[in-house]
């Protein structure tokens, strides 16, 4: 595990401990003031203050990269150079097309298994929704991803039994009226937050045609409208300093019905997403929630690829990443130019 933040402690560590037939955490690396040591001692694993020590450890076969997005590409390249056989990378895979080309080229050339932690894409509920859409042969008219994100510490504490961290040092005030600052924030949030749902959007609407509007949302968030695959999609999110629990809804409107998917808050294991389908007559069908969630399914997928039970699809990873980067770049450009909705 490269990275030992609260998300690792609340999410990946318990997930892997529950999959002891497939995985064992043997080394944790993090530069964050003793965090790797604290987790390492708890898990009976070695620890390092930097990634180099972990990558040099011959007991490490699989590297999990759970660090800020801007570090992902360089750490993937370093893991491949160290001869590791598989990599689990938190989303996003890369933040630029140059990084993406380098990462996929090296992994494919060295036959390294690569899985990106897009947990909504791996959620079993999404497979059932896709089956429903395929069987109904309905045409998708619109898609929306609507997110109100409560502080993550709320869920770190709930899962890991930790005390919520103190507030970080004050940053310069965010001025969304500044088009340069607002564009940078919107791009960063699309790459780092909307990325949860962008593979789902691309699943339904594979060709990005245009960004119709884009703006930053106070206190910090985004509202972006796109045209893709002959339909419309709206991506909106706001990060709240306090208040209600996280709400994460993905909605699909088709020529036949309306599908609503409510994903669980981050960092908690409460089973798959909840799905409701409302047909033209107003009848509502609810899909049963299953015990496995997307976090568990993504790690199971990695094990299945390593066993040869599932193919390694670099082209799908590439298509998802290119879609996200192109959208983030185009939305930032709209914000920067001040194009009115």
Image: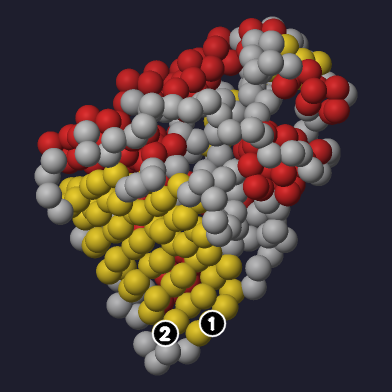
Whether the residues at callouts 2 and 1 have beta carbons within 8 Å, the answer is yes
Q: Position of residue 245 (x, y in %)?
A: 58, 58
Q: Which residue is mark 1?
A: 285
Q: In the displayed structure, does residue 277 sit left or right of residue 291?
A: left
Could one spot residue 325 in this view of the protein?
A: no
Within 10 Å of the Cα at label 1, are there few (<14), some (14-19), or many (20+) other Cα atoms?
few
Give the total of numbered labels.
2
Tell me if residue 64 comes above or below residue 320 in the rendering.
above
Q: Earlier in the sequence, mark 2 or mark 1?
A: 2
* Residue drawn at 34 percent across, 54 percent down: 235
- Furthest toward the bottom, the residue is 281
* Residue drawn at 39 percent across, 39 percent down: 189
At mark 1, the secondary structure is strand
- Between 321 and 38, the residue placed more toward the observer is 38
Q: Position of residue 111 (x, y in %)?
A: 54, 23
Quadrant housing the N terminus: top right
Q: Which residue is mark 2?
A: 279
- Between 208 and 264, the residue placed more toward the observer is 264
CA gap between label 2 and label 1 equals: 8 Å
Quarter-of-image position of residue 23: top right
- Between 157 and 125, the residue placed more toward the observer is 157
Q: In the displayed structure, does residue 333 sit left or right of residue 80?
A: left
Within 10 Å of the Cα at label 2, are there few (<14), some (14-19), or many (20+) other Cα atoms?
some
Q: In the displayed structure, does residue 129 sit left or right of residue 255?
A: right
Q: Position of residue 279 (x, y in %)?
A: 42, 84
Q: Position of residue 193 (x, y in %)?
A: 44, 42
* Residue drawn at 80 percent across, 23 percent down: 38
């Amino acid at each position: 595990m490269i990275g030992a933040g609260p998300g690792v402690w609340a999410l990946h560590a318990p997930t892997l401990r529950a999959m002891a037939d497939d995985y064992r955490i043997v080394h944790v690396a993090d530069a964050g003031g003793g965090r790797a040591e604290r987790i390492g001692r708890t898990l009976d694993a070695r620890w390092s203050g930097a990634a180099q020590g972990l990558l040099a450890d011959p007991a490490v076969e699989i590297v999990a990269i759970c660090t800020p997005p801007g570090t992902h590409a360089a750490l993937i390249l370093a893991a491949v150079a160290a001869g590791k056989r598989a990599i689990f990378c938190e989303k996003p895979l890369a933040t630029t097309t140059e990084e993406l080309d380098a990462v996929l080229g090296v992994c494919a050339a060295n036959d390294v298994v690569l899985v990106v932690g897009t947990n909504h894409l791996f959620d079993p509920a999404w497979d059932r929704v896709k089956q429903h859409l395929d069987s109904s042969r309905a045409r998708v008219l619109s898609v929306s991803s609507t997110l109100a994100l409560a502080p993550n510490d709320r869920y770190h504490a709930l899962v890991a039994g930790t005390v919520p961290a103190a507030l970080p040092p004050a940053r310069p005030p965010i001025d969304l009226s500044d088009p340069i600052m607002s564009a940078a924030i919107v791009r960063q949030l699309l790459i780092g937050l909307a990325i949860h749902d962008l593979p789902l959007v691309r699943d339904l609407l594979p060709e990005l045609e245009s960004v119709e509007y884009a703006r930053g949302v106070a206190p910090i968030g985004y509202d972006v409208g796109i045209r893709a695959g002959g339909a419309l999609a709206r991506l909106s999110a706001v990060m709240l300093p306090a208040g209600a629990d996280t709400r994460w809804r993905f909605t699909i409107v088709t020529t036949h019905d309306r599908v609503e998917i409510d994903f669980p808050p981050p960092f908690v294991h409460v089973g798959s997403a909840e799905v409701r389908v409302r047909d033209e007559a107003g009848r509502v069908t609810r899909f049963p929630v299953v015990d496995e969630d997307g976090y568990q399914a993504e790690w199971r997928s990695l094990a299945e690829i390593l066993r040869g039970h599932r193919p390694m699809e670099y082209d799908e990873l590439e298509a998802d990443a290119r879609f996200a980067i192109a959208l983030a770049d185009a939305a930032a450009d709209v914000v920067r130019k001040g194009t009115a909705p």
